[in-house]
Each structure stands twice: as structure tokens, then as C-alpha cells.
Amino acid sequence: MTGSVNSHEILIMPTQNMSKGDEAYAVSAAIPLTAKGITLIFGRQSNEERKLEEGIDAGNKEFGVVGGEALIVFEDVFVPWERVFMCGEIDFSGMLVERFATLHRQNYGGCKGGVSDIIIGATALAAQYQGTANASHIKDKLIEMIHLAETVYACSVACSAMGYQTQSGAFYPDPLLANCTKHNITRNIYEISRLAQDIAGGIMATLPFDQDLRSSEVGKYVKKFLVGVEGIPTETRMKILRLIENMTGGTCMVESMHGAGPPQSQRVMYQRLGNLPQKIKWAKTLAKIKDE
Amino acid sequence: MTGSVNSHEILIMPTQNMSKGDEAYAVSAAIPLTAKGITLIFGRQSNEERKLEEGIDAGNKEFGVVGGEALIVFEDVFVPWERVFMCGEIDFSGMLVERFATLHRQNYGGCKGGVSDIIIGATALAAQYQGTANASHIKDKLIEMIHLAETVYACSVACSAMGYQTQSGAFYPDPLLANCTKHNITRNIYEISRLAQDIAGGIMATLPFDQDLRSSEVGKYVKKFLVGVEGIPTETRMKILRLIENMTGGTCMVESMHGAGPPQSQRVMYQRLGNLPQKIKWAKTLAKIKDE
Amino acid sequence: MTGSVNSHEILIMPTQNMSKGDEAYAVSAAIPLTAKGITLIFGRQSNEERKLEEGIDAGNKEFGVVGGEALIVFEDVFVPWERVFMCGEIDFSGMLVERFATLHRQNYGGCKGGVSDIIIGATALAAQYQGTANASHIKDKLIEMIHLAETVYACSVACSAMGYQTQSGAFYPDPLLANCTKHNITRNIYEISRLAQDIAGGIMATLPFDQDLRSSEVGKYVKKFLVGVEGIPTETRMKILRLIENMTGGTCMVESMHGAGPPQSQRVMYQRLGNLPQKIKWAKTLAKIKDE
Amino acid sequence: MTGSVNSHEILIMPTQNMSKGDEAYAVSAAIPLTAKGITLIFGRQSNEERKLEEGIDAGNKEFGVVGGEALIVFEDVFVPWERVFMCGEIDFSGMLVERFATLHRQNYGGCKGGVSDIIIGATALAAQYQGTANASHIKDKLIEMIHLAETVYACSVACSAMGYQTQSGAFYPDPLLANCTKHNITRNIYEISRLAQDIAGGIMATLPFDQDLRSSEVGKYVKKFLVGVEGIPTETRMKILRLIENMTGGTCMVESMHGAGPPQSQRVMYQRLGNLPQKIKWAKTLAKIKDE
């Protein structure tokens, strides 16, 4: 669903383990987006109208506009047999979901680690523009943001490093650590965003429209009273604050929570992969408890 | 600034302690919003265009539209002498700020405690509509949200209960506990919102437009595929999800962070009011350390 | 159980709701500790042998020695009828437990708020003795400790302020806020202790014995190399570090967790007292959802 | 210092960056522990007297007794020239400290990850013995503990995987991620311990002495009233609870905080290695801010 509107082809697959009677839903295939019978109903995103404007409020159209999820409806879509990957094999639908989820959870630490680096940079810059960059609590919060971002990145690296080659020749990340990666993201990105909003200041949410900045009537006020430190005009300050606003609220956050599966799906995997019996055995040895 | 556009009068006052040379800024006065020379430049809020629409996405116009901050510019505004409360008294500007901040921080626990109650109710309802309300992790997260909301409410009650009557006859809350109230809000509201987004699901951020629901072309799909549990049509589900979206992201969050002063301003007050010397004295007594 | 060994009388009561068939356990009575048939088996506490020593490691015998829990065994203990408060009234055992728990959870914020104040004072003093008190991160951590302590104290105040007078004439705190008090303690005290151990430094856990300080052979080394800042001898520094050690680890922590009921018992109360239906009703009003 | 008392040789090295005038302290050497002039004053540990006892309370003497820090005093110790690694080279003392710290912080995730696995196993076992293992909140807390343990382990793997070979042929971990590893430990181990104490129950801190269990007078009570679920005698239950007690309090915790450097030392490294200028550059590109 994510990114489907700007894709050449879309891939469908089951979303859960299946059992006898579910055969009709145990299907996977690749289909051109333009195939007859496919309808995409695009989700409404935070502040989406702004992207149709000109100026600062529109954000960066080269990089910022393509994401987005769609409700994809199939109605009598023809799929050539050579593009069908699963058709009724219920025994493998659970494994397929788990494989997909593991790979998706692996790459989240790289994706959101990178997103976090941008937020950290933008926040540090906003602090410079607003003259607070040297306050010890600002520096400490930026350090905390770096810590949280490096943690999710480290998890992504770890599940990759501990991965292995499957019989097919492809590499597969360590599933426990891949789930650990995504689970940290469902928390750390929220805290990074909270700290970004702390440092950016209330101005982030009270900023006038770009049209006000350019208005012949009130533009002079916006330029004068919302100016940054020496050499930083209001316009430059607004640019960085709008970037932080876009990256720390709304759709972005929900995507960090639910993309690649909600938190509880990772916790289910912890229960399955956490190997409590082995941990209990070690504890018994140290506590000198003999198995009966 | 907050709520000024729909007020009869606005009140201006200093925002910090002042010293010799700052007399021109040590002013406080009440002015009708319509006074000559006042310009309000309204801030751009999250998803503000939606409020001009009809239908679900517009939200609740009776209750949800009035907040909002404005950049307020004064240019040769005449203020009758009887509405001037401070004019150059630099010795009192610090006290005035502190008094105002204390009262504002006190009431945040009531305000945001109430807001949280709505978010909790909306989230519980979304879980019911989506069939997840009986999962133990959902119930546990709702309990956590209640705990966080009750904590901010408790702080508001506590600073009120420990308040005292000033010579003027007015009551003044305990300033240390009032700061404690606001400081918890800058954290708990973010965590409450995070949990709401966890429970509400990815659908919260991928929901189609209200126009799509009503579309003669694709409305049937939205109605069919995004329906809730038995008896809950898509429309009802969309209403509650849009409410959660509105209350857990964007402007609302920044306001919880910075309204009544940013977190660091509360920490400065902890340093001033925390009375470390008394705490050190108690510790010395217990550790049998005699003062030299 | 807590404090029983140094009490004149002990009070027994049920620990849970009871139903038909449990009559023999629905009993409450007051009994002198010295009554025939009572055996107390004292629990083993952290570092309890130190209390039998002389010198710094023994801690403060006037204030620090009396706590402690005992396994209390009753074997054919005679209880005069006038000291029996409940005898088989299963319908009231649940209410009795809830009343007791509410009052106990109320006072935890005062108790542990005070304990926290001592820990904060001791930690601030250790920082002074060790020359780190002016570092911005030390000051910030002390502020955080104050915030966490004031939060538990505020909850205690709030549930008292919102309490009411029962028909008996006694006052009863607000049960939801009383549970909120205790629930915060099961978290905040641990975080306060963690920060105390951060500031106190590794020396807290590597400190030599008091006998080493006084040893004719190695005492000179301990005095020379573990000295504090100018004017603070090793002995004074050791006193405050041992106090922090005693208050931030072992038995003390478990008591913060489980005294007046473990965390889950408060969460059960949140589920019962949190009034989700009312919150759902408010959310429905705002989202314009009509009850069917 | 750690483990010195049971080592053949000890290694000394500088603990900070040095400058002109510090030459006499810029020394590194290996010395046999038995060399003339070396005095070790062993630190007092939590519950150290128990290790001299027989029975459950003594813990596991094979594995649990060797750690421990000592104040090590040098007085005219002769060091043969071939065992001196640094002697006045102030330019390299900072680098030496950083290298040592990076390697030490790297391995903490493996060490404390393993320690955490034991705590998790012991806690799961205690829950089984006490009949609470199937409660959903117990299972959820164990999952949380696994998540926290896997996170520190993942960081250790990541800094190793991103390491590189130095000119000497030795491998060196990524310093930023090594600091990330240790920084997570200063938090996660405390939370893991808190959750272990939550699940283990108040009994962990109120458990009688091993001698009481074996007492001819009161042993029968301890055996009867503190028994576990069917088939688990009091003795077995006590063994696992004492293990949890030993691993979640006192010296162990402080060591997690300060071993390989206190939290602030990692934050200083974040400031140096976090590369804010690069992050700012990326943010500028996205926000379309041109460098002047």
C-alpha cells in the first residue's frame, strides 16, 4: 500500500498465518498498477493541501511528496500465471508473512535512523537560528536524540550482521534482532520528535502562513518580528521550522508505529523467539536447582 | 496570543525578569481587540483547511475551531490610563511573570487531564469499533493512559490544595507543585498520544477523504472495506479516528509542550524552589555529619 | 508484617475478596505481639549484618534499624472477643481490603516523597564533597530527582484533598488518585535511585570497609586517596556514600514496589475506577456519534 | 581495579587526556599482583558476609564470588623496563583512554546482555514456582525484559560489525556505536531489574534466613508457609529468589552504571562523534536553505 501510487507494479501477499478453508486468501502476485480492475483510494495525510501550494509551506516537492498509503481495491483483475507466486499454499502463508516482516523490520532502523538524523540536524539548526544552541540543556537534548537514533540504527546493523544465507542464496537477517529494531522505533522516534518540538519552540506551531510572509500588508511584520539571530532572515527560519513540523507529527509518526507491523506483533515474536526455556536452564544452573 | 482572535479584549504583560534600562518593556495593559493599530496574523495550524470543509474531516466546528495563536502587532495603539496595570515598574515584572506562569501551569493539569480523558474515551471506542477492545494488551495500554492522565490531574489538584490566600484576597497555588503539573504534561500527553496511535492502528493515518466515502464512484469500496465490527458503519469508525488524529498530533502536541512555558522554564523553577539546602541538612542528620 | 517486631500489637486482616466457603479466612483482629502461639521469623535484609557493627558501615541505629518484615505464624492463638473485628463476614472482606489499600497507597506518596528528599539531599551533598556539584548535568539530574519526588508527593496531596468523610466520621481519600500515587512510586523511586547512583559515582560500590579506614596498616591510604574536596575528610565522604547505598538498593527498592500492593493491583483498580464508559460518552459527543 | 584480587598481573594506565606538566602521570605498565610495594584494599560489597556462610544464602561460590573492586596503592614499586608501555607520552594518553573505553563499552552489551538473560530466566522460573507465569501482565513484563536485553546485545553486535582493522592488525569497534552500547546499559539494566523485582514479588525482600529454613524450631513453618506451587519446595523457591536478589541490587547495579565510564562520559563522546555539521547539511538540503 505504501508508495503504491508511484510504483510500476504492486505486490500482494497474505497478512497472517492461514489454515484449511483460507486457500482463497493464500495468494501472492505482482500486478502492474495500471491493470484493469485496480482502484486506488489515496489516504488523507497531514497537511496534504499544502503540497499543492507554492512557497515554504509546500515543503520539498522533490523529496517529500511521494510517500502515502492507498486503499487498493481489486475487482476481477487478471494476473498472468507467471506472476503468481502463491496460490492456495496455506502451509506457507505464515512463513511468508514472517519473512516479509523480518526484512521490513530490519530496514526500519536504517530508514528511521536516517530520518532521525535529518530531524536532529534540522533541530540543531533551528537552535542556532534562534540563538539557543549553546544552552547546556539544548546540547544535552540533541545528544539524547543522537543516542536514540544510533540505537535504532545499531539494531538494524546487528540483525543484518547476525543474518545468514538461506538455501535460495538470499540473505536473511536475524529475526529476533529485526523485531528488536522495529520495536525500538515505535518508541524512540516518538521521543526524538518530542525533543525536537521541545527545542524548536512554540513558534513551530504558531508560525504564520507563507502567504503572510509575502503579503504586502503584513509581510513587513512577519519579517521584522519573527527574524532569527543576526544574518538569519525570517524566511530561512520558517523553512527549517516547517521541515521539523512535517517530520515530527501526523502521518509520519503513525507510520513509525505501524509500518512493518504494530508493536504487539513484535512482542508476539519475542514470545516465540525469546527462548525462555534456555534462559531458565541457565538460571537453574547458577541457582543450583536440579531438574527433577 | 492563544485564543486572542475570538476574545473581546487581550492582555499584554512582560515575559521575563527586567532590569534598569528595560522600563519601556515593563508594561501591562488590557486592550479591546478592535483597537486601532492592532494587527493579528493568525498562525497556520495542522490540517487547518479541513475546517472549511463539510463532513467528517472538518471535525467539530462547535468545539474544535476556536483555539489558535496569532502574532499580535501593536503600532501606535492608544491605551486609556485606567487599563494600564504596569508602566515601567521593572522590580515587579519578574514577580508578575512568575505569578502568571504559576496559575497557568496549575490549570494545565485540569485542561490536559480533560483532553486526555477524551483521547482515552475515543481510543477505547476505536478499539471497540475495530474489535480489539478485549485484547489484554489493549486493555493494559488504556490503563496506562488513565494512569498518565490521572497523574497530571492529581498534580493540578495538589498545587491548588496546597495554595494559599494572598493579601489581595485572591488564592495562589503552590508554585513548586504548579511547575510539577506542567512538567508532567510535557511528557505524559506525548505518551498518551503515542499509545492512542498504537491502539487506533495504521488506519488512522491512511484513512481516505470524507469525499471518497461519499463518492458515487469509490464510496462503495470505502463503505465495504473499512467497515467496523457488526453494526458499526465506516462513517462512524472514520469519525472517531479523525477525532484521535486531530487530538494526538501537530499543533495540539506543541501546545502541550510550550503552553505556559517550555520544560526548561519549569526546571529553572525547580532549581529555585526545590530547597536543596534543607534536603542536604536532613541527609546530614541521618548520616551523622556535623556542620563544621 | 512490616514493623511487627517492634510493635506492641499486630493487626490481621484478609488480603482479598472472599466468597462462600472462605468464612474461616474472613477474619480480622488485633493481638498483642507477645500472645502465646505467635512466632515471628524475621526476613533477611540487605546488608543486615552491618547493623551489628560499630562505625560508619553500621548506619544510623537510631533511625535506620527498625523496619523489617517478618513471617508471622499463628498457632492456637487466643483472641479476646472484644478485639475481633471481623469473623466470617465474607461480604465485607473485599471492601476491607480496598479501604486498607487505598489508605496505604495514599500515604506512600508522603512516605516515599520524604525518603526521596533525603536521597536527593544526600546525593547533592555527595556531589559537593566530590567536586562535581557545579557540572550542568549533575544539576540537571538533581532537578529531575526533585521532579519525580514532587510528583509522588503531589499525588498523595491530591487523593487527600479529593477525599471525603464517611458515615463513621473518618475521612477517606479518593481511591483512584490513591492508586495513582502508589503506581507512580513503583516507577519514580527506582528512577530516583538510578540517578542517585549515577551522581554518587562508582565509589559508592567500591568503598572499603570502615575497619580499613581505621586500620593502623592501611587506614593512611584510605584517608589519603579517597579524600573529598578541600576540607572534606574521607570519613565524611564515606558517611554520605553509605547512606546513599543503603537507601537506593536492596530491600528498600522492593518495598517501594510491593508495599501497599504490587503494580498490577493498582492497574486492576484503574480498570474498575477509571470509568471508561463516561470517557467514551464524551468522545462520542465531540465526534458527533449518536448512540443507536 | 575490577577483578584485580584474583588476577596474576594488573595493568595500569592513564584515565584522562593529559597536557604539559602531567608527564609523571602519563604512565602505563603491567605488574605482577605480588610485586613488592602493592597494597590492595578490597571494597565492601552488598551482602558480602553471606558468601562466607553455608547454604542457600551464600549463593554460588563457583561463579558468584570473584568480582570485586579494590583500591590499589603503589608505593615504590619496581617495574622492569620491558613491561612499561607508556612513560610520559602525554600526546597519546587521551587516545589510549578512548581506545580502552571503546573496547570496554563494546563488550558491555555482551556481558550485561548475558547477565540479563540469566535474570530473565530466573524471573520466569520464579513466576512458574509462584503460580503467576500465565498471567498476561507477567508474560508481557518478561517480553519487555527480553526486548531491553536484546537491545543492549544488538548494540554490542553492531559496534563490532561496523569495526575496522587498525594498522597494528587488531580490530577496533565503531566508537560511536560502542558508546551507544554502554549508554543503553546504564538504563536498560535498571529497568530489567525493576521488572524482575516486580515479578519476583515482595517475598524477594522478606525471605527468612537459610538457617531459619533448616532450624529445628521454625523450619517447619518456613517449609509449610513459603512453599511454591505443587512439587516446588520452599528451598527451591528460595534458591531462585536469592539469585534474583543478588543480581538486581547493590553492587551489580552500580557496576552497570559506572563500569567502562559513567553515562556522562558517553554523552561527551556523542558530542564529539555525533557529527552534527553533517546532519545540519542534510537538513539544509531538504529545507532548501542555501549556505551563504
Image (cartoon, coloured by chain):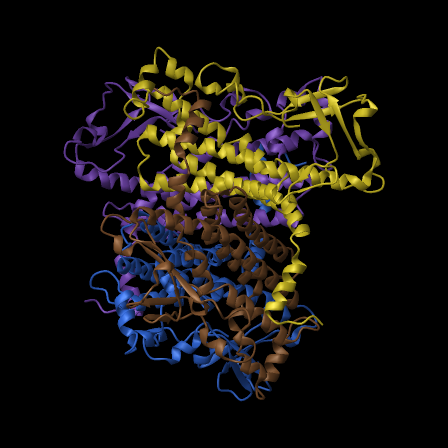
Chain colours: A purple, B yellow, C brown, D blue
Residue C148 screen position, x and y as percent: 55, 51
As drawn, is A267 to the left or to the right of D268?
left
Residue C59 screen position, x and y as percent: 54, 73
Of residues C118 and B119, the one nearer the viewer is: C118
Quarter of the picture containing the C terminus of chain A is bottom left
Q: Is residue D75 above or below residue C200?
A: below
* Image quadrant in which you'd find residue C36: bottom left
Q: Is residue C256 above or below residue D259?
A: above
Q: Is residue B122 above or below residue D236?
A: above
Most extreme residue toward the top is B216
Residue C66 screen position, x and y as percent: 48, 69
Residue D17 visible (yes or no): no
Residue A292 visible (yes or no): yes
Residue D65 screen position, x and y as percent: 39, 76
As drawn, is D46 to the left or to the right of D39?
left
- The residue located at (39%, 19%) in the rendering is C290
